[in-house]
Amino acid sequence: MNEYDTHTIQSELVAGGHQLVESPADANLVILNTCAIRGKPVEKVNSLLGELRKERRSGRDLTIALMGCLAQLEEGQELARRFGVDILIGPGAITDIVPAIRSLDEGAETFSSLDFQPGLDTHLTPAPSSLSGFLTIMRGCNHHCTYCIVPSTRGPEVSRPVEIIMREVEAMRDAGVQEIYLLGQNVNSYGLGDPGLPSFAELLRLVASSGIPRVKFTTSHPMNFSSDIVDAIAETQNICNYIHLPVQSGSNRVLRRMAREYRRDRYLAIVDEIRAKIDDVVISTDIIVGFPGESDDDFEATLSLYDEAQFDHAFTFIYSARPGTPSHRHFEDMPREIKTERLKRLIERQKAWAQTSNQRFLDREVRVLFKDMARDGDYVVGHSDQNHTVLVPKEQVLRLGLYRVRVDHVTPHTLYGHVAGSRPEAIPLMMAS
Ligand code: 5AD
Ligand code: SF4
């Protein structure tokens, strides 16, 4: 989401006549597009702002902008005051960046915009020149997970009009984009409560019918992850067999305290349905360890859920008490050592299952998109339909695009392979009727 917002900010700046530079050292304006979901990124912003202030004090002519989720919070506004930030813009007002610069040029001391502007939903993001593009389909979140700051920073759910989404999809397709990533805090809430909009499953089929070779989406929520979504993925060749479905905990007691609206059995039933209907599917999840009050038994329940779901991958987090959230207000944090010990055990479990999962692809072909010449030593880095990181020797990929790669060797993080055939595979275009 933040990466997408960064693209939008960049295209606004370029359209407004500003120039992007390679290094912050060459800039007159430095924008920090921030994340506030956990305490760590906030600490990083703190130290970056400190460095920028130091440079300014030593005579550098520099405008500093704080954007993104942190800007929306009192915590961020306090930092902005402390470090002399000139421009403060929340995630609902990112297109204000050019007017903000203008206003400073015209003599204003500071600029601040923290509204959720309806105009953002119709704002057309120019097609990127890359082979892979992000496309926001909805913003905000109507859930109230007790640990999470997002509902305060990004506001309630708003689905973007389908005509605008499709116009962007077509613009991207015509620009040669091979992969579209549909983005939203809860993509499967798309269109809920608005009879004028398609459901998420319908939207998926619609986007896929544009002929984009690869359609991915993130993040899904277990609530409303209905059978019609699973069917749309199973029945549509160019919707990727990759589902990111955050579970957060395997303990019903913890799920209740987190105010997650499903329980362990329901979650596992969704996983069963996905695995039964979608061939070669890869499922990843988010898990938080050390939520206040998580007992040894609760944590064991998370490990056992992991084994039952056999996740292909997981993003694992230590609970971070965020000021302004209900869990910060009402529950006591637990000792750091317990949390790190649990995280260590969970990561071991994650690695073991990732190795098992990746072995399924050994000696088989996967379809890989090389969207840039990103290198890892002597290898070029691409991503499979199921979102694996795939490395092939650099001399085998001379131009960018989709390739068939035969997998020779796997680790928990990576598939290593070689290009099967010397040319990118022909890309089947299924045009909309
Ligand atoms: N502490 C730790 N992890 C968090 N997440 C959200 N809020 C917190 C928090 N306060 C995690 C959740 C979510 C992911 C994007 O970040 O797992 O799914
Ligand atoms: Fe945060 Fe929960 Fe909304 Fe996800 S669903 S953004 S964790 S409140």
Image (tube, rainbow, N blue to C red):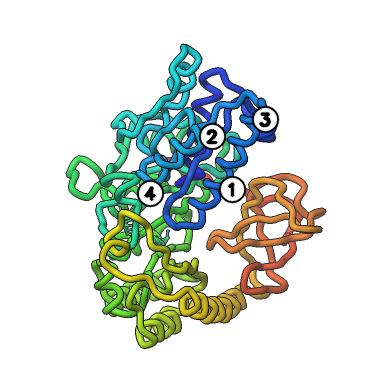
Residue 106 appears anywhere in the view = yes
The amino acid on which the numbered mark 2 sits, given as a three-letter code, is Ile
In which quadrant is the C terminus drawn?
Answer: top left
Q: Is residue 243 left or right of residue 195?
A: right
Q: Give the Cα separation between the discs numbered 1 and 3.
A: 55 Å
Q: Of circles 2 and 3, which is in front?
A: 3
Classed neighbour count for the residue bearing mark 3: other residues with Cα under 10 Å, few (<14), some (14–19), many (≥20): few
- Answer whether labels 1 and 2 touch (C-beta < 8 Å): no
- Mark closest to the chain's N terminus, 4 or 1: 4
Tell me the residue that label 4 is attached to.
184
Q: Of circles 4 and 2, which is in front?
A: 2
Query: How far across and how far down the image is residue 25, in percent?
Result: 69, 33
Tell me the residue that label 1 is attached to.
427
Query: How far across and how far down the image is residue 388, in percent?
Result: 59, 63
The amino acid on which the numbered mark 3 sits, given as a three-letter code, is Ser
Q: Is residue 37 above or below residue 285?
A: above
- Mark closest to the chain's N terminus, 3 or 4: 3
Q: Secondary structure at mark 2?
A: strand
